[in-house]
Image (spheres, grey):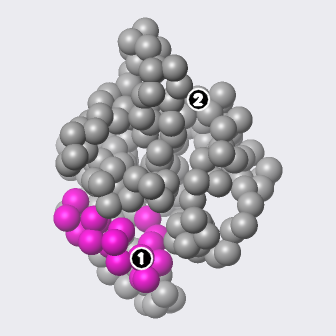
Amino acid sequence: MNLRQRIADRARSARLRDGTRVFLRPLRETDLSHAQEYFASLSEQSRYLRFMIPTPTLTAETLAQAAKTLHEVGAAITVAVVDHGDREELIGGARVVPTDRRGIAEFAVSLADAWQGRGIGAVLLREVVRLGRALGYHHVEGLVLTQNTRMLTVARRARFRVQPDHRDLSVTIVSRALHP
């Protein structure tokens, strides 16, 4: 990703604990053509933890929903990429979408297996908070499988409230108030 493209995307950079520099930028429609490649980089376990059901393939419906989100008012998708000079590698993303409750957005985070445990999850949760504020929300919340202890730990460290969903104890609600 050259400097001109980073400026056009309003990309921001972040440094991981190991010093690796990653860029955060909005999802582009052209990224959707690489979605299958990214999805293939996820293990069966990671797909299950993200979608909460066995998800062997990325469906056309899921891609259509992502494309719709690009144009939906009050929604945003940010991707984390590593710049390899001649190409970008998509390593994760965060999605913020409106709910039917005023001032509350739902979020989801996805991260390629090879990048887990390196601090990008915390970076993406900070991005969720930033996007939520920028979109005018007062609160963000996401659903995390209770067995996803690594994500729950990252959420706690990022000052998200973590509480069981009393309707389904296999799910934990992760939320945070967004103060200006």
Q: Is residue 46 magenta?
A: no
Up-down: is 77 above or below 12? Answer: below
Q: Position of residue 175 (x, y in %)?
A: 33, 66
Q: Secondary structure at mark 1?
A: loop
Q: Is residue 167 left or right of residue 163?
A: right
In the image, which disc is placed on residue 28? Answer: 2
Instruction: Identify the image quadrant of the C terminus.
Output: top left
Callout 1 environment at 10 Å: few (<14), some (14 to 19), or many (20+)?
some
Range of the magenta residues?
142-158
Q: Is residue 129 left or right of residue 159?
A: right
Foreground pick, 34 / 123: 34
Up-down: is 75 above or below 5? Answer: below
Q: Label 1, label 2: how many angstroms apart (C-alpha)? A: 29 Å
Q: Identify the residue under disc 1.
A: 148
Quarter of the image for residue 59 reads bottom right
Identify the residue at image location x=43%, y=65%.
Answer: 142
Callout 2 environment at 10 Å: few (<14), some (14 to 19), or many (20+)?
some
Badge 1 amino acid:
Asn
Identify the residue at image location x=20%, y=48%.
Answer: 17
Q: Position of residue 61 (x, y in %)?
A: 77, 53
Q: Count the marks: how many?
A: 2
Identify the residue at image location x=71%, y=35%.
Answer: 33
Badge 2 amino acid:
Arg
